[in-house]
């Protein structure tokens, strides 16, 4: 996660602006093109082999959603974008997966970049990919790194004509897709919250050397979320306050609601960061307490043996004029004195509640 978080783009310096260079991992062998075209009465869904089959969707009176899975096919993306009149600088941003969330108002269309985050149940960690949106006059184009997203519920609503999505325009479709991305953040935060609660029990009961590694991993995941969510707030704010002709007045309240969800996500995330930082402090305190307990036991043992060592040292000098050396019961008397002194010190420590 840390490598992904701080990795920089590998674009060669000196290339002219608008040069399309795929920056990121190639996550799919062949790009996949699908589209949905619908209105209140009819609906079409297809997977096509050629991007040219999507060209007629630019000038229809219906709402069209074109989705591209795979950003490494530069020719495909270039052909689609050129037909839809997308600026070369926007095309460059689409294939660069290291961008932070942002929005560009190009008058004829809006361009947005979001980080689509999902929780991997098998690996028990965050999976992230960049998704780009182009909102045009009657269409929405999305670019993803690989198949598998958080939009299946949106597709199902379009197929079954449930809700208001088939009755609304393409701006509501863009809202629905972005809202699905934002809603998935709550799922990720819920799973991270469970991990933090489990870590709290581990830190309190049985902290080990692996505990600090787990805490550090959670810290990196929260930092990655923060880098994805904070710029998203600016994107949604601009959409909410946008004067673009592409955003209708009846859609603005939905973007306002999504903004509220984003603020809630930020609050939850900051709370979890504070909790995780507290676990770091708790972990260090637990180690310090354990060390103090060990030192306390060792100190008590050493303190008990100090007078016993003194007595043994005195009678180990073997001077001739020591009267006890010739006494028949001297050995047993010294052992008895040492036993009495040791027991008295143990009782004294218990009375002081040091044991």
Image (cartoon, rainbow, N blue to C red):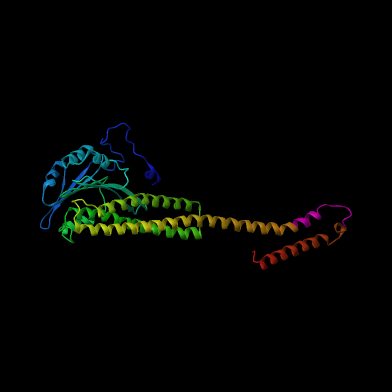
Expressed as whole percent of the image width and height from the top left, the position of residue 316 reads 80, 53
What is the magenta range? 308-322
Q: Is residue 102 above or below residue 20?
A: below
Expressed as whole percent of the image width and height from the top left, the position of residue 23 reads 30, 39
Judging depth in this view, the residue of 217 and 168 nearest the camera is 168
Q: Quadrant of residue 43?
A: bottom left
In the rendered image, residue 321 lying in the magenta stretch gets the answer: yes
Q: Quadrant of the C terminus?
A: bottom right
One can see residue 151 in this view = no
Expressed as whole percent of the image width and height from the top left, the position of residue 324 reads 85, 59
One can see residue 179 in this view = yes
Say whether residue 238 is left or right of residue 42: right
Name, please, the residue furthest toward the front. Answer: 243
Q: Residue at x 20, y 39 (%)?
A: 76
Judging depth in this view, the residue of 208 and 70 nearest the camera is 70
In the rendered image, residue 127 lying in the magenta stretch gets the answer: no
Q: Quadrant of residue 184?
A: bottom left
Name, please, the residue furthest toward the bottom. Answer: 351
């Amino acid at each position: 996660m840390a490598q992904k978080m701080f990795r920089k783009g590998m674009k060669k310096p000196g290339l002219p602006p608008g040069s399309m260079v795929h920056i990121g991992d190639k996550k799919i062998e062949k790009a996949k093109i699908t589209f949905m075209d619908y209105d209140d009465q009819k609906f079409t869904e297809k997977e096509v082999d050629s991007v040219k089959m999507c060209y007629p969707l630019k000038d229809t009176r219906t709402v069209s959603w074109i989705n591209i899975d795979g950003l490494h096919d530069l020719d495909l993306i270039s052909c689609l974008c050129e037909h839809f009149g997308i600026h070369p600088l926007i095309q460059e941003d689409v294939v660069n997966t290291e961008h932070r969330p942002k929005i560009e108002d190009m008058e004829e269309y809006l361009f947005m970049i979001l980080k689509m985050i999902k929780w991997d149940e098998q690996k028990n960690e965050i999976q992230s990919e960049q998704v780009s949106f182009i909102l045009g006059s009657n269409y929405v184009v999305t670019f993803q790194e690989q198949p598998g997203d958080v939009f299946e519920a949106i597709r199902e609503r379009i197929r079954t004509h449930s809700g208001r999505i088939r009755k609304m325009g393409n701006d509501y479709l863009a809202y629905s897709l972005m809202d699905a991305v934002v809603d998935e953040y709550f799922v990720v935060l819920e799973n991270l919250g469970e991990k933090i609660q489990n870590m709290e029990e581990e830190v309190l009961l049985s902290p080990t050397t692996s505990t600090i590694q787990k805490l550090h991993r959670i810290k990196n995941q929260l930092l990655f979320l923060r880098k994805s969510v904070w710029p998203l707030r600016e994107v949604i704010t601009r959409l909410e306050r946008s004067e673009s002709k592409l955003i209708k007045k009846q859609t603005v309240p939905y973007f306002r609601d999504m903004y509220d969800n984003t603020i809630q996500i930020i609050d939850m995330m900051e709370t979890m960061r504070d909790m995780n930082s507290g676990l770091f402090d708790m972990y260090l305190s637990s180690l310090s307490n354990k060390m103090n307990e060990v030192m306390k036991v060792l100190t008590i043992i050493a303190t008990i043996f100090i007078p016993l060592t003194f007595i043994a040292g005195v009678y180990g000098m073997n001077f001739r004029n020591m009267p006890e050396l010739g006494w028949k019961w001297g050995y047993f008397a010294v052992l008895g004195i040492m036993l009495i002194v040791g027991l008295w010190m143990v009782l004294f420590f218990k009375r002081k509640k040091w044991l």
